[in-house]
């Protein structure tokens, strides 16, 4: 379908209350099908491919995150009532911006490890500096245009799969989309944008669930802690045995935490 003049791939699954699911970078909407299936009898889920991913086009003249937010906002506007919103990793940064900019369109917000590193620049500078150091191998390879090494460095930190172990077709897809990690840096790494988001967090009045994997990089917990401290009433939970790709590898456990949260069970 066309959204804002760009070809956009969209998946639909389930019946019930409207929901919007946003996948992580380097993936596509299909990656969340396991989690979507868990909600099939409860929600009518829409899941777009992020710009430049799957079947979606990317306009290199526009900010990557801005495009993703605009696409998702158009999909939310098609609902006749507020939708439940789920975002994973970069998709969770898009979901957070949607909640801040369009709160009346959203019934609840679940974020699995939003990679909003820029939030730490102003309130946890040591953690921000460590992240810059930990991502240096990726940054150096990407700056040199060595995308295979950039992919190796990125997946070594954030995925349970290593680049050289992937099927050639998967490797080709990663190499196609990995430059978009660089395109996302203005929104999720540069301090200026993070400061703006940080100042708006206290305005968020939606039910918010912050999830992370027990085996994820420590930086994800530090970002979630910043969000929990500034979003009134936000609930946090850890998915046992999961890493950063928990919504894909541990979909049933993620579904369980979301279901308990939405039912009001705080145990």
Image (tube, grey):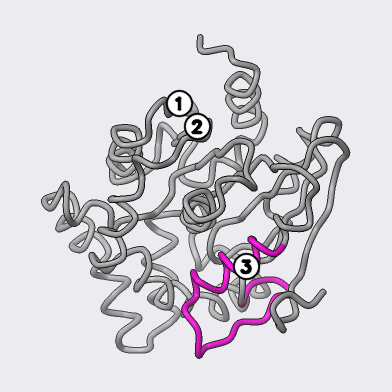
Between marks 1 and 2 in the image, the one whose residue lies nearer the viewer: 2
Region in magenta: 52-74
Q: Say if residue 236 shows up in the picture.
A: no
Q: Which residue is mark 3?
A: 50
Cβ atoms under marks 1 and 2 closer than 8 Å: yes
The quarter of the displayed image where residue 22 is located: bottom right
Q: Earlier in the sequence, mark 2 or mark 3?
A: 3
Give the residue displayed 72% in from the left and 84% down from the top: 5
Name the secondary structure under disc 3.
Answer: loop
Which residue is situated farthest in the left direction here?
126
Please state the horizontal and vertical placement of residue 198, each as a whole percent of the image. 29, 50
Is 245 left or right of 186, judged from the image as shown?
right
1 or 2: tag closer to the N-terminus: 2
The answer to the question of whether label 1 and label 3 lie on touching residues, with beta carbons closer than 8 A, is: no
Element class at badge 2: strand
Residue 235 placement, left or right of 139:
right
In magenta stretch: residue 62: yes
The residue sitting at 16% across, 47% down in the picture is: 124
- Residue highlighted by disc 1: 237
- Mark 2 — residue? 209
Image quadrant in which you'd find residue 55:
bottom right
Residue 89 drawn at (x, y percent): 48, 52
- Give left or right: position of 153 versus 96: left
Q: Residues within 10 Å of mark 2 (few under 14, many from 20)?
A: many
């Amino acid at each position: 379908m066309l959204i804002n003049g760009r070809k956009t791939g969209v998946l639909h699954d389930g019946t019930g209350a409207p929901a919007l699911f946003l996948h992580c970078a380097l993936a596509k909407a299909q990656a969340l099908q396991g989690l979507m299936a868990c909600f099939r009898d409860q929600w009518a889920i829409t899941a777009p491919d992020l710009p430049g991913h799957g079947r979606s086009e990317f306009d290199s003249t526009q900010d990557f995150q801005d495009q993703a937010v605009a696409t998702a906002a158009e999909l939310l506007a098609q609902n006749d009532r507020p939708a439940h919103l789920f975002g994973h990793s970069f998709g969770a940064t898009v979901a957070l911006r949607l909640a801040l900019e369009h709160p009346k369109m959203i019934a609840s917000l679940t974020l699995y490890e939003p990679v909003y590193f820029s939030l730490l620049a102003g309130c946890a500078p040591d953690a921000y500096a460590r992240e810059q150091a930990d991502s240096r191998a990726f940054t150096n390879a990407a700056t040199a245009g060595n995308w295979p090494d950039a992919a190796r460095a990125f997946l070594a930190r954030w995925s349970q799969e290593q680049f050289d172990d992937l099927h050639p077709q998967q490797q080709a897809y990663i190499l196609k989309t990995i430059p978009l990690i660089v395109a996302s840096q203005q929104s999720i790494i540069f301090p200026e944008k993070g400061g703006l988001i940080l100042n708006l967090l206290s305005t968020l009045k939606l039910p918010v669930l912050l999830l992370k994997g027990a085996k994820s990089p420590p930086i994800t917990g530090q970002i979630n802690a910043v969000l929990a401290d500034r979003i009134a009433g936000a609930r946090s939970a850890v998915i046992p045995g999961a890493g950063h790709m928990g919504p894909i590898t541990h979909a049933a456990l993620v579904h369980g935490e979301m279901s308990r949260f939405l039912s009001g069970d705080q145990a």
